[in-house]
Amino acid sequence: MIGSLSRWFGAARNFAQTARGIRAFIRTPPPADCVGLVQRQLQNRDAAFLDTLRRVVFDNPAHPYREMFRLAKCSHEDVAKLVQSDSLEAALIQIRAAGVYLSHDEFKGNAPIVRDGREIHASTNSFRNPMVKGTMRHVTSGSRGKPTPSYRSPEFMLHQEALHEIVVREFGLEQRAQVVLRPTLPSALGLQDCAIIARRGHRLEAWYSSGQGGMYVPATAALVLMARSVGCRIPFPTVLPENDFSSAAEQVARLCKEGVPCLVSGPASPAVRLAAAALDGGLDISGTLFLISGESLTDAKRLVIEQAGAEPYARYGVSEMGFIGHGCRRMTKGDCVHLYSNALAAITHRRPAPLTDIEVDSLLYTTLLPSAPLVLINFEVNDSGVLEKADCDCEFSRVGFHWRIRDIFSFGKMTGHGMTMMGTELVRLLEDVLPARLGGRPGDFQLIEYEGSTQTTIELRVSPRVRGSSPEKIRECFLSEIRLLSGGSLAGRAWQHADALEVVLAEPVVTASGKINPLHLLGRSTPRQVQLPQATNLPE
């Protein structure tokens, strides 16, 4: 009873805070010159970083980064000299080597921060920016651990709005009817995206949501009413039936038939579902743009969207920092984006992926804007990619975004029964190989690792849309294919011996932000039945 009341009051407090944030943002006039604002930030990035470093870190003896710098024997003056003598990125590489960085597990509190043999005490709140008062609450999806809130101020939202204007110019979005695929609360991304589009006066056709229910739908509707009452014409979200995107595809097709060009924006999983629904229903959505975020735009996902006659482009973001970059019209292969270097500095660090001997170029980010929700220096997000100069002629390059990140992927892994499998190989198996052999499309197969009562269990979820294969055939196909992967032969035998592999007929698990992760790793502290509802074992 006490726990339920506590959760209810917590939800009510978060709702009220988000409502204040939305109202404050809507009442703040848009930037008069979005491109000029971004270019001024680019020109001032070194000074902004050094000023924030002094005010937030070095002027606070209790700050975790202050202790890292102390152990590295590096003062604010030392950092300033490094920046001025070479570049901000070169300075960040040197201080990373000296021990000034933050891993994702350390930020989440899943691992202690230890430097030079000493533990540095910190919590997630230690890295909040004290120079701003964040009001709009954002929550990570929890796809890499427990959900973590961050709070965005109206000033930071204006920065996001300014970046959106560059996207508008690159893709001619003012001429397109826009369809948003975003979840309702507790995620605020749907409200944020719709508010920015509506404030620019563009045609916002619909907002579709999947995976949410309960009190979150009416709570979101209340915030939409509030926004509309102060002049921001956000549409009410349409909650789709479970994994049924046919109505969204039909609306896009109707607009295309009327000669209205369309844009669909949202995470890759629901975007692919909309494109697949168009293909399955014989609907023509040719010429529609898809701006994909939230998860990797793999070749398999890209192919489904292109088969529907549409054009997919990647945009890359992390909840703690906002959007990191956006693809331009020239970036038509893989996950490739221009880095938003006005707001972030990026470096790579060569390291082994967790529990393997495979090395990756791990991406580390440093926040630069005084309005950033968090102050992060060399923050490792468990993503890998190639950081290089961008030589394309596009709106992003003309503004001054001359760096790009390509081949972005998360270096996740499965470690059940002592067998380590790299996530990149498993994703290809789940999104390319199994659909080719058994039918279905990307998003129809999902591997889930969870801690059962006696052992780690590997669950292969198969969407009910995949028909014509028996459970035994699915199991045999999966095991035969996994044996071809690095380490897969041992893993397959170990799972078979322990009877640890279950084939389950159920829709894939969807995160709070609408993502379908091909690999869904559950923590030891949460019972399976809490996180995986509506799973039905296939009969043997």
Image (cartoon, rainbow, N blue to C red):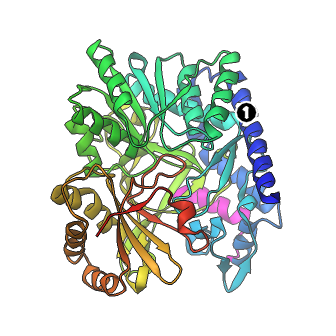
Q: Main secondary structure of the magenta part?
A: helix
Quick one: 153 or 223, which is closer to the camera?
Answer: 223
Task: State yes or no: residue 181 in magenta.
Answer: no
Q: Relative to 411, is 248 above or below?
A: above
- Please give the name of the residue rendered at 52% of the width and 58% of the height, measured from the top-left corner: 89
**Relative to residue 364, is residue 8 drawn left or right?**
right
The region drawn magenta spans 72-90
Image location of residue 409, percent across then percent down: 38, 59
**Quarter of the figure with residue 273:** top left
Task: State yes or no: residue 76 in magenta.
Answer: yes
- Residue 330 visible in the displayed image: no
Number of other residues with Cα within 10 Å of mark 1, as a class: few under 14, some 14 to 19, many 20 or more: many
Secondary structure at badge 1 equals: helix
Which image quadrant: the C terminus? bottom left
Q: Relative to 56, is 311 above or below?
A: above
Which image quadrant: the N terminus? bottom right
Amino acid at dot 1: Ala
- Please give the name of the residue rendered at 38% of the width and 22% of the height, measured from the top-left corner: 172
Q: Which residue is mark 1?
A: 19
Quick one: 231 or 438, which is closer to the camera?
Answer: 438
Image location of residue 192, percent across then percent down: 59, 33
Image location of residue 517, percent across then percent down: 42, 57
**Quarter of the figure with residue 153:** top right
